[in-house]
Image: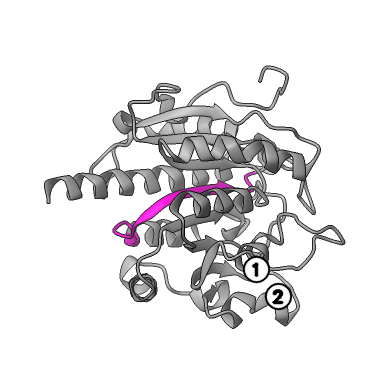
Amino acid sequence: MTAFAFLSNTSFLKVPVNDTRRPFAIAGVAWDGCVTNRPGARFGPRAIREASHMLCDGTHPLFDVSPEAALTDVGDLPLPNTSLREMRAAMAPLVRTLIAHYHMAWLGGDHSITLALLRAYRQHFGRPLAVVHFDAHCDTWKDHFGEPSGHGTWVYEAIQEGLVVKECFVQFGIRSAGEREARDYVRDQGGIIHTARALRGLESPAQLQPLVAELRERVAAHGNPPLYLSLDIDCLDPAFAPGTGTPEPGGMSTNQVLSLLEEMADLPFVGMDCVEVAPPYDHADLTSYAAAQFVWTYLCARVARQAQKAVA
């Protein structure tokens, strides 16, 4: 791993590394070979980890828990960095081993890593997953500028491969330019799209709670499949997250995303990724801090839910 200068050498929240006794784990996937605009997301895992050190003792003000005692960091996956096919092939056994042992939070990397992750989770659980997807982009293109796969095709591929429950695929923040066939693909397949335009003015937990209630009902109606969270940092407006490869004005606020993550705390998530953080374009580490906060909030919610189940 020392051959890759961009791999992280510090842990999320400064937790111990490779502690197999802990149920939650962080791993980095430092790959950005599929970006269509500005590269740099391979540096995301390191920047997110460093930003997480600002979280003091790590105790969440809403959930009143810290994930530190339950969390370890297994470092960045050692992967090829010039071939998408070879990267995914090398990634698959590593992911399978980790999700068999830990509840994982993955730090990207560009969004092409999510397809490999969903394949592994689909195999692990033996059934398709429900997905909550935060993004500026629909990621439903049938090809990647002439190539068969990339960071803008993973949703289409996941649906085509049967990795997900189409009716339980929910998108938040979509707003980029695109032809109708791609833009509305998730909705046409039976899923839900909450565009950035539709979310304007919905800021507080009370205002956003009906959207979460709809998700909760949809998941329950389809037999409570395993639920996965994929959070592209460019769901945020560039005012909140300038450090990303394909920024799109008119996006969500940090407040909106945090409110939704907090309101979804009771849902049965089995893992998450946070992708497309590109530190070379960041200002004052705003993007890295937002990403660290989102991952930390997700983990705190998981730890709090685990504690509640143990008491019950």
Residue toward you, 145 or 270: 270
The part of the image, by quadrant, that contains residue 135 is bottom right
In percent of the image, x 37 and y 32: which residue is there? 71
Would you say residue 31 is visible in this rendering? Answer: no
Q: Distance of mark 1 from mark 2, alpha carbons? A: 14 Å
Label 1 or label 2, whichever lies nearer to me, is 1
Q: Which residue is mark 2?
A: 182
Q: Is residue 156 left or right of residue 199?
A: right
Residue 7 drawn at (x, y percent): 64, 26
Pick out the residue farthest to the top: 2
Is the image coloured rainbow, by chain, by secondary structure, or in one colour?
Answer: one colour
Residue 281 drawn at (x, y percent): 70, 43
Residue toward you, 33 or 202: 33
**Residue 272: within the magenta?**
yes
In percent of the image, x 74 and y 74: which residue is there? 178
Q: Which residue is mark 1?
A: 160
What stretch of residues is rendered in magenta? 263-277
Q: Residues within 10 Å of mark 1 (few under 14, many from 20)?
A: few
Pick out the residue farthest to the right: 146
The quadrant of the rendering that contains the N terminus is: top right
Q: Is residue 160 left or right of residue 217?
A: right
